[in-house]
Amino acid sequence: MGSSAANTNGVGRRDLIKRSAALGLIAVPTMGFLASCASGDSGSDDKTEKGKKSDKNPLAVNDSAGLDFVLFDGGFGTEYGKDAVKLYEKAYPKAKVKFSGVEKIQSELQPRFNGGTPPDLVDNSGAEQMDMGVLVGKKQLADLTPLLDAPSFDDPAKKVRDTLRPGIVEMGQYEDDACYVFNYAYTVYGVWYSQTALDKLEVEYPETWDDMLSVCAKAKKQGIAGWTYAGKYPYYIPFSLFPFIGKIGGREVLDKIDNLEPNAWKDPAVKAGFEAYYELFKKGYILKGTPGLTHIQSQTEWTQGKALFIPNGSWVENEAIKTTPKNFQMKVGAPSSLDKSDKLPFGALWASGGEPFIVPKNAKNPDGGMEQLRIMLSEASSKNFTAKVKSLSAYNGGTDGMKLSTALQSGVDALAKAGDNVLNPRLQDWYVELNKQKIGIGVLGEMMAGRMTPAEAIKKCQSYADATAKDDSVTHYKHR
Amino acid sequence: MQHGKYRFIAGFLIVPLAIYAVFVIWPFVQAIYYSFTDWTGLSPDFKMVGFDNYTKMFDDGTFWKSAQHSVTYVLLLPVVVLALALFFAFMINVGGRRRKDAAIAGVRGSAFYKIVYFFPQVLSIAIVALLFQFAYNPRNGAFSAILRGIGLGSVQPDWLGDPNLALWCIMAVLVWTQVGFFVVLFSAGMASIPKDFYEAALLDGANRFTTFFRITLPLLWDTVQSGWVYMGILSLGAEAFAVVQIMSVGPGGPADSTTVLPLLVYQKAFRDGQAGYATTIGVALLIITLIFSAIVMRLGRRERLEF
């Protein structure tokens, strides 16, 4: 006995156990995890009652209602949020604020949105950001117009709307005039460099592409690469490439790309921009090994002086702070001019909101969420934010009398120089998949690694954009 | 004592079966149901869209790339891992030189090797992936340093940044983490093979090669087969997902060259807000997994040996 070889007919005991074990094993990796987000009930109706409207309380917040505030705990930390909560509690001593710093926004909040019990205010940011396009398309967000039209915290004669930097309100708008997203931080994108490194080479920041190439050539002779970028996350390349294209061909080129118009990528400005960047690869001005580096690794190579330029956003100062030498003098530059026929003058650059705050439509206390934002948009809170995280906020100005770091000051200067020529490409917040997976990783990363020519790259970008335009499951947006 | 037997068995099984039904079967049914909806995962409203998700999937180039990579993994990984593990386990347990007191023994220091092989198994897959991410750094990672050290300074691949290399780099990490477990598993299996068999083989003048293929492997077949299924599931599911998610460019790149099905499910559900479409890909993954298990079960069926 003890043999099961005899059981050739029918299912033997061991066979049964074996098969059920195999089935169980299959179940877990394939679909088990999707089950955890099975759909819940629709939104709850137990909204908090409105409070009494007054000069101090223009949004009519119920002063004893609780507030549930979830902040993304990333490069900026949570301290600025905690400080703002303290101010809220001071204004409404009876209110109980539940504040949580969360790193994985989507994992924690997706079930709550799906179940109809989201928090009252969310900083929807980071690698696990929930797709704004979907949230707006599915009517999950509250319109923030009441906040924008409320008197500002510091000056009752001014609306909140009038205290903001350019592009902030526009960035929160999707298909109508309603503003669904409020970007609290203000990011300057562009070509980041070290003034010290340029001084050592005895060159100025190159304002024309010819100068750019000669600076890179000079650096190469000394064994320094011209450029590096986050090769593992090639969707950092657009931070300097997109405004470069916008500068060459004007704002309309970028708008057409964002609107997914046919042949938008075939504009001569795109071709010129791609070819200029491809030349950096061809001439060997890109740090060796860059396609295999993460954003942190490439930033470290850059702060160690192995490369001069890196496409990035103003969070890099805080993010790279540990590896940045004291005398680095970090600065941001606007994209160089390609030639005299450029549509926009030198100085045009990409600046736009970051740290998108949302007030969910199904939240219990949406007024409280907006009031918290209004408090954060006071001059004092804004200054506190800038001092703590080394980034500008959506509040226009408010840096007077503050001692700014070199990087922050260069951002302020760049904005002043840009004036009205602030560009704001929307691909990255409207079409996450198209921007990251298709164009970033699929095309730009390949082109900059020298595995795709600019002509092929343009063709691919256009075909990906066309596919997204045709896809009915994606909500489409247009510049207005 | 036959009457009431089934009632007795059912009484014991009802609770576990109910739990199984609620937590395993029901999610399956639900997932299949969701695959016919336009559920976003971010809002409780959705509607039925028929086979839209399936037509979309068949037109999705990234899906086909992912499926191709997942199938590559499920075909290659078990072969490589199990072959290496069998080889190591054999050398540790049987393959040593004959010593005076024992007819069979492992190579010198085998006890030590057994522990070393098992090391990767105690590290979480996330940590392993992170460590290798540093090792694959083309600027100052270990592998590039080794190449420079042996005078191959001119060969400096981008490792994970190179679409022709990235998939294999990631596969190597999976092999590295998994081999140790199977070495230990097979060692245990080999320990239960009676020593007389080996002694008899020795007397007949069998060499290591014949000993392995005529004695060890046939007697170990059941264990190998379980390992095969287990390894297949790992390479279709969670482990492959984790390393690709953490290590690869993008993740999933460069240019879709490393993406796998579970990663695509994750990205669709948790990045693009297309949970309905994600479940559709999940169903495809389920079908591939079922086909894989069916093939393994059929191929592995043979007369069980008794001893």
Image (cartoon, coloured by chain):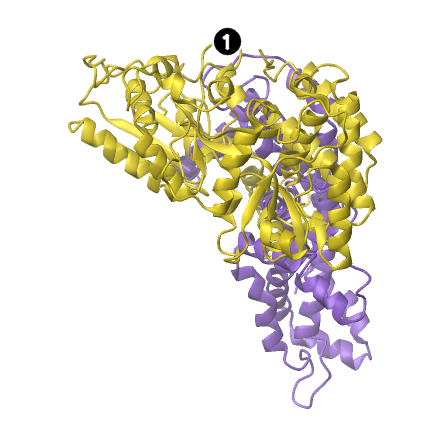
Give percent across and percent down for residue B77: 71, 51
Of A421 and A137, the residue lying toward us: A421
Q: Is residue B121 visible?
A: yes
Give percent across and percent down for residue A284: 80, 50
Lateral position of residue B216 relative to residue A74, left or right: right
Of B117 and B267, the residue lying toward us: B267
Q: Is residue A153 above or below residue A286?
A: above
Of A380 and A445, the residue lying toward us: A380
The shade of chain B is: purple
The residue furthest top is A176
The residue furthest left is A94
Q: Which residue type carries mark 1?
A: Asp
Give percent across and percent down for residue A453: 83, 36
Q: Is residue A3 visible?
A: no
Residue B86 position by quadrant: bottom right
Chain that is yellow in the image: A
Q: Is residue A201 above or below residue A82?
A: below
Q: Is disc 1 surrounded by few (<14), some (14 to 19) or many (20+) residues within 10 Å? A: few
Callout 1: helix, strand or loop? loop
Tell me the residue at 25%/15% (across/down). Answer: A58
- Mark 1 = which residue? A176
Residue A434 position by quadrant: top right
